[in-house]
């Protein structure tokens, strides 16, 4: 494998010092015209490319922020990344996007990589429910902002959606439609979002005078379509099958919808379905999916802006004030929940 060309190679080829090459690159006006031409010729001939990462490390100001999400296969997180990238680009920064795949071990590896690269800061949707990965990363002194999760302390910023309110919106809609037995396809129980959406669902049932037994939870190991299909198969096997299902995200809901379609179960007349996130595919499903909308692009942009504010050199004399931004969800009603009961 060919070795990369360094600044010393350029200096040797041009017959000048390393300092002169550095001046040609960074302060060309300080170098004599003939010498500058000789150095530029050597750079062109050798194919030398300046190490931007090394320059940034010397300056202590990386132009890259990290973004670590739970699942880049989920369009919700693609939209979060779009929002973050837009805000970063406007500030002259780039975004390094990584996917923990809902795996705490992979999350730890990527956080270690961010620390090694000395990124400007990190936008993080945690996969590790214990918080150990965050505590380890915090020791590096690199600022980070939590995305799609509320910060529990005052040591970092966060941008999230009120998932308790979102879960209540979904189940209140189903109760208002006449459903009294509802399944909750919940995803991994360790995720805060999953627990908060369940809390909201139980709150809506209590408002209607129904007890927690009206909600049948079907946990899944992942938050993807395959897990939704599996949950749908389990749902079909229940003797006293609920008449509606609320899913912790749209991918699960689409999987449940596929399972019902394959089994000949009519949606919504035999089973109403509500998802969460309102990804683009929700409206385009065979039966358009009712969903709780999260402003994903806005979340990503706001998180990036908070991180930029924290890492700017000209912050106020009082320093950066950590903030927890909580956005409100919105119920988008489509045919998957509009049964005539």
Image: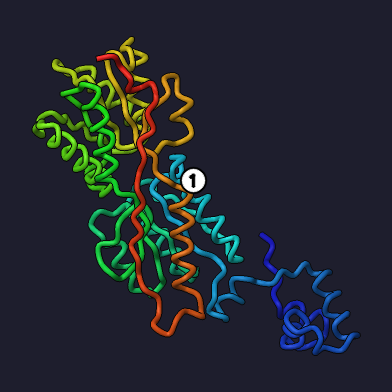
Horizontal side, residue 341 vs residue 225: left or right: left
> Which of 144 and 20 lies nearest the eye of the viewer?
144
Report x, y in % for residue 23.
Answer: 75, 85
Of the 4 image quadrants, the one containing the C terminus is: top left
Report x, y in % for residue 158.
Answer: 35, 60
Q: Is residue 81 above or below residue 134?
A: above
Q: Is residue 238 above or below residue 157?
A: above
Residue located 51% across and 80% down the image: 314
Pointer 1 residue = 79
Which color mode does the image show? Answer: rainbow
> Which of 209 and 140 lies nearest the eye of the viewer?
209
To which quarter of the image does residue 215 belong? top left
Task: Looking at this view, name the residue that lies furthest to the right.
Answer: 34
To which quarter of the image does residue 10 belong? bottom right
Horizontal side, residue 205 vs residue 297: left or right: left
Residue located 23% across and 47% down the image: 190
> Which of 182 and 77 lies nearest the eye of the viewer?
182
Report x, y in % for residue 110.
Answer: 42, 58
């Amino acid at each position: 494998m060919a070795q990369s060309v360094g600044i010393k190679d350029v200096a040797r080829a041009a017959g000048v010092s390393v300092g002169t090459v550095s001046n040609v690159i960074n302060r060309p006006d300080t170098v004599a015209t003939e010498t500058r031409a000789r150095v530029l010729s050597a750079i062109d001939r050798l194919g030398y490319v300046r190490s931007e990462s090394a320059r940034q490390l010397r300056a202590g100001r990386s132009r890259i922020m990290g973004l670590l999400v739970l699942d880049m296969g989920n369009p919700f997180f693609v939209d979060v990344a779009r929002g973050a990238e837009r805000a970063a680009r406007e500030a002259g920064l780039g975004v390094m996007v990584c996917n923990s795949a809902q795996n705490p071990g992979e999350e730890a590896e990527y956080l270690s990589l961010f620390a090694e690269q000395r990124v400007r800061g990190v936008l993080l949707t945690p996969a590790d429910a214990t918080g150990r990965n965050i505590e380890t990363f915090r020791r590096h002194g690199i600022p980070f902002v939590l995305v799609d999760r509320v910060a529990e302390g005052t040591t970092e910023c966060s941008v999230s959606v009120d998932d308790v309110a979102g879960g209540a919106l979904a189940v209140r809609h189903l109760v208002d439609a006449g459903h009294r037995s509802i399944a909750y396809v919940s995803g991994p129980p360790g995720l805060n979002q999953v627990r908060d959406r369940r809390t909201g669902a139980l709150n809506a049932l209590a408002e209607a005078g129904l007890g927690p037994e009206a909600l049948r939870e079907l946990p899944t190991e992942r938050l993807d379509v395959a897990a939704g299909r599996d949950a749908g198969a389990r749902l079909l096997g229940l003797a006293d099958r609920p008449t509606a299902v609320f899913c912790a995200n749209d991918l699960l809901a689409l999987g449940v919808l596929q399972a019902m379609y394959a089994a000949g179960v009519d949606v919504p007349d035999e089973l109403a379905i509500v998802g969460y996130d309102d990804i683009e595919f929700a409206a385009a499903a065979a039966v358009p999916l009712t969903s709780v909308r999260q402003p994903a692009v806005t979340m990503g942009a706001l998180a990036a802006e908070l991180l930029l504010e924290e890492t700017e050199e000209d912050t106020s004399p009082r320093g950066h004030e950590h903030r927890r931004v909580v956005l409100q969800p919105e119920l988008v009603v489509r045919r998957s929940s509009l049964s005539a009961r």
